[in-house]
Image (cartoon, rainbow, N blue to C red):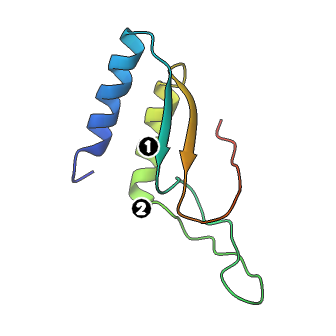
Amino acid sequence: DPFGQFAWLEGQLAKAATEDIKVLIAAHVAPGGNAWPTDKLRFFDTSSLMVPQYIDSYLAIMAATEATIVGQLFGHTHHDSFRLQY
């Protein structure tokens, strides 16, 4: 995390938790793989949308603060979809 984004996120979520504020996270790129076809043959790209080394860090933060987070919204794919994270 060269820009300290995870540290910032953890701090914001900790502050929200102490103030009993629920949080909706909005971000550009979702953790996990690309679930959309990449060519005319409709093959699916299983590469990660997020830098792979940061996925575990992000998911650990989400798990540790799940009582504070009410949802997460992501863009990037330009498709309507949903994912379950548990």
| 1 or 2: tag closer to the N-terminus | 2
Circle number at residue 43 = none
**Secondary structure category for the residue under label 1:** helix
> Given the current orientation, which residue lies at the most extreme right position?
41
Residue 60's place in the image compared with 74, above or below, is: above
Q: Position of residue 27 (x, y in %)?
A: 46, 48
Q: Position of residue 28 (x, y in %)?
A: 46, 55
> Given the current orientation, which residue lies at the most extreme left position?
3
> Given the current orientation, which residue lies at the most extreme bottom position?
40
> Hey, what amino acid is under mark 1?
Tyr
**Secondary structure category for the residue under label 2:** loop
Q: Residue drawn at (46%, 36%), measured in percent from left and top?
A: 60
> Hey, what amino acid is under mark 2?
Val
Q: Residue drawn at (33%, 27%), measured in percent from left and top?
A: 12
The residue under label 2 is 51
**Residue 34 is drawn in which quadrant?**
bottom right
Q: Quadrant of the C terminus?
A: top right
> Badge 1, how many Cα within 10 Å: few under 14, some, many 20+?
some
The residue under label 1 is 58
